[in-house]
Image (cartoon, rainbow, N blue to C red):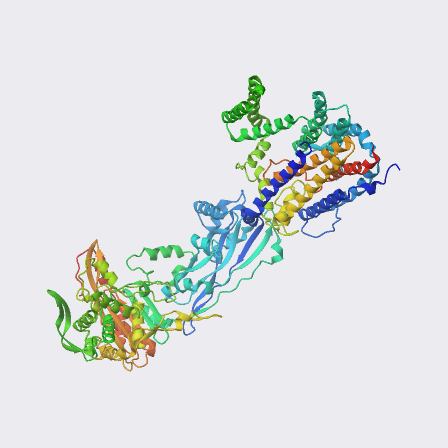
Amino acid sequence: MKNQSVSNNIDWLTVLLYSILVVMGWMTIYSASLPTETTSIFDLSQIYGKQLLFILVTIPLIFVVLTVDAKIYEKYALIFYGASIVLLAGLFVFGKTIKGQTNWYSFGSFGLQPSEFAKIATALVLAKFLSDVQISLKNTQHQLIAFGIIALPVMLIMMQPDAGSAMIFAALILALYRDGLPSWYLWTGVIAIVLFFASLFLRLPFILLIVLGVMLIHYFLSRRAHRNPILYTLLFIAIAGFTYSTGFVYDNVLEPHQKDRIDVLFGEEVNQQAEGYNLNQSLIAIGSGGWTGKGYLEGTQTKGGFVPEQHTDYIFTTVGEEWGFSGAILVIGIFVTLFIRIIYLAERQKSSFSRTYGYCVASILFMHFFVNIAMLIRLFPTIGVPLPFFSYGGSSLFAFTILLFIFIKLDANKVNEW
Amino acid sequence: MRKILLPALIIAAALLIVARLFYLQVLDDSYIKKSENNAIKIKYEYPERGYIYDRNGKLLVANQPSYDIMVTPNEMEKDLDTMEVCRLLNVTKGYFLERVEKAKVYSPRLPSVFLSQLSKKDFAAFQEKIRRFKGFDIVKRSLRDYQVNAAANVFGYIGQVGEATIAKNPYYKSGDLIGRQGVEQVYEDVLRGVKGVQYIQKDRFNREIGSFKDGIYDTLAVKGRDITLTLDIELQKYGEALMFEKRGGIVALEPKSGEILALVTAPTYDPALLVGRDRSKNYRMLENDTIGMPLFDRGLLAEYPPGSPFKILTGLIGLQEEVINENSAFTCHHGFSYGRGAFMRCHDSGTNRLHEGIYKSCNTYFANTFKLTIDKYTKPEYGVNAWSSHLKSFGLGDFLGYDLPPGRKGLIPTSKFYKRFYPNGGWRSSTIISNSIGQGEVLMTPIQLANMMATVANQGYYYTPHIIKKIQDGKIDPKFTGKHYTSIDKQYFQPVIDGLYDVYNLGTARGLGVPDIEICGKTGTAENFAKINGVRTQLTDHSIFVAFAPRHDPKIAIAVFVENGYWGARWAGPIATLMIEKYLKGTITRKDLETKMLTKGLKQEYEKVISGQPFRINQ
């Protein structure tokens, strides 16, 4: 009895969580884009009308994703990857430039954002690469290939430039870690981030003094056999060099608006009408929600259109304002449940390909979720990434849907693998 | 470990976000305020202030519309034609910048007053072009329109609310008007009504996009309620006219109710001076008159030595303490000797009983009575305390509790007071003997004196004096309808009243009588001192008169103080008599007295004190 019916094995909990998020997302977009005079909810001249159309289009999309042979995703992973690289590169010729960013193909009033789909392809290729029994992430050469797979689309996206989308790919490191990437990569990353932010607050000699102190303590606490003065010295020089260069990067490499975003994060006074304005309005909208919010369609900040781009990257501000703290934790709870469910399912997979892909899906969705909400509440610098299933936009909705449903298909198909 | 990292990271990140949201949404409520400032515009509608009537239903205070130009700094545009605004409103650029700066300090998002209390024609040209001046608004308020030029001290005035009040009372916003002084202050809550509020939802371009929550929080303005005062405005006006070029106060009460019939202070001012654009200029002018002090309500605030009218109390206490009776007699030899070299002079001589003592105002009689009262007790402390507690039962030495800004307590010394004064002891009845005749330490305000006369007229009780007679759709404070009994028994009043009646027939107010009205009165002549260039200098005595009438059915009790008017029957007596006749009969028979009071004053007397030249007193 080959090929059991797919529908019998679909993880309906994941589908349910997905559906709840999409419906809540649409309701929020409706509120955020409600015009003063009432119109039909299918009005395609309105944002909520278009989003409703997108949601309807996902239904056949899901059907296709679930019905094609699960093998295709593994088999043609490289082809999908190649195609998305071509699409990304093609932007520099055919793309449409909006606000200095070239990340769209434009078809009339609709657009296509290839970076959204590149995430799926990259996840598939990465999973395929790692599922090969010959491959081990303990091997430096294999590590480099894995990083290369991630780096290629990141570079093209950075050139658009779209720092937010590029950053999401960093989440794939978390999936690599599950598959055996040595942990010092993570430690290096964490230390680098800590040093970068520390260098914004503290003077260089002071940071080096702390680093030196920590290293000396570590040196004398470690076993005598492990004490290697040369290694410690080299490490210290590397850290010193890195910390020095972050100051240089901050001053000379970052764009002024990116610097402003970092300054705003740490509460520096920045012109309220420019960089600080978005964050300030976002905080006001969310902060004024209280325990239970102002009520659906009753958000004063939302109605007044104070938060810019509220239906896309800032959609969670409407949740915070109209549904309050209770609504916000409900939405967060649903997201977290979805992520944990995906990881749980991934661990259940028989094939290494499916498991790695599941981890990639969870990592990407989580990264979007965290960066998006954290930037609204001043936990993270302002970076434009959409909130999965919530934010307005066809490309992102389609991409997230395909990303998730390929995994659901793989999961449903596991009974057929041996 | 490798399986744990991602779920752990997800949960940690979610908890971090939830904690931050909890802080922003639940703990920190500043964003709620910011959101309101941001998205909701509040529009106020100011109701008309309640009218004020006199006891006979005559309209005293009505309203006139007035317009304020308001500015909201955040709504002003960068390319605003400042010079044009200044030209149309006739203000300087310096004024413009100063007001806008001030408005920013108060709130960049709320309207502040730019130019206040304009009449329609003042801003007609500006109004035509107001659409070009974003951030400027015209608000209609109601200002007072006085129907009489009198009783300014009773009415008080209305002015812009101060920052301290705004901070304390959330009802008031910058630019609102509030009653100050007089009944405007005391009955502010009744008179002002409740302003209407409209919440309007704005968008980020500050455009109005409809009412907030379909107007469920909006309220309509409620008109202020009218009040009726106990004042008889004709009597009040007459009293003010009689105080022509004099300083002092007149308080007239209705003994049967405690209602204030007239509350005159002199000099006074036209209440209309404190309305409109010149209000602050005029207020400063009145405030700067530190000699006449027109803003100082002498009827309530001036503490004078009461002089001879105080003998009424000395006599009543003596009777109550049973140290004298109405037949007790003392012999006077032009004065009273109370120690070696200590002598209180008296204009009288001969042997007097209580009756003569009162109408002749014999110092000796009351000095003896006082001495006996204090010395009845084993120690002077006990004597003074007994004496002062009798006085306090008349409402003296404390706030009377009337419904006008509280005024002054006056002074009734107790043993504590003298212990502080003479820390080594050694004081006795003779040390403080001057109190017997209303000099010494005792101080009373004119309203306390008038209330004392009302108490005597009632033979032992008084009502708390009050100015409110009726409140539209409301009740007056019940404390104004309860009797306060004194510690003097009713039986002791009649002999004193008989003495007061003969003040007009045989005594110090002979020649002031009015046909057909039996008046009981008492003159007073009080020594007083002032510091001139740092030197304590005696000035001409205050002329004092207290009275009530008619004798058998008292309808009015009155106290009159004329500063530096010399003896009581010279100025205060005629004024009290004329006021009584005016109130009881409506017409004046003593035209001779009236003409003198209306046309003669004490200008010269007051001028010589400030002339810097040496001067003589009591001429």
Q: Tell me if A92 is positioned left or right of B85 in this view.
A: right
Q: In this view, does A31 lie above or below B321?
A: above
| Quadrant, the N terminus of chain A | top right
Q: Please say whether residue B595 is visible from this viewpoint.
A: no
Residue at the (70%, 45%) spot, across then down? A25
Q: Is residue A414 above or below residue A289?
A: above
Q: Is residue A111 above or below residue B261?
A: above
Give the x, y percent position of residue B74.
53, 46
- Residue B153 at x, y percent in the picture: 36, 64
Q: How many marks?
A: 0
Question: Given the current orientation, which residue lies at the most extreme left position?
Answer: B340
Image quarter for residue A92?
top right
Q: Where is residue B177 in the image (x, y as percent from the top left)?
A: 45, 58
Relative to B235, is B4 on the left or the right? right
Please identify the quadrant where the C terminus of chain A is shown: top right
Q: Is residue A66 above or below residue B407?
A: above
Looking at the image, which is closer to me, B182 or A2? A2
Q: Residue B227 or A225: which is nearer the viewer?
A: A225
Residue B528 relative to residue A315: left or right: left
Q: Is any part of residue B321 visible from this angle?
A: yes
Q: Farthest residue to the top: give it.
A: A230
Q: Which residue lies furthest to the right in this view?
A: A1
**Residue A82 in picture, x, y percent from top left:** 77, 27
Nearer to the camera, A126 or B129: A126
Quarter assignment of residue A236: top right
Q: Which is nearer the eye, B119 or B197?
A: B197
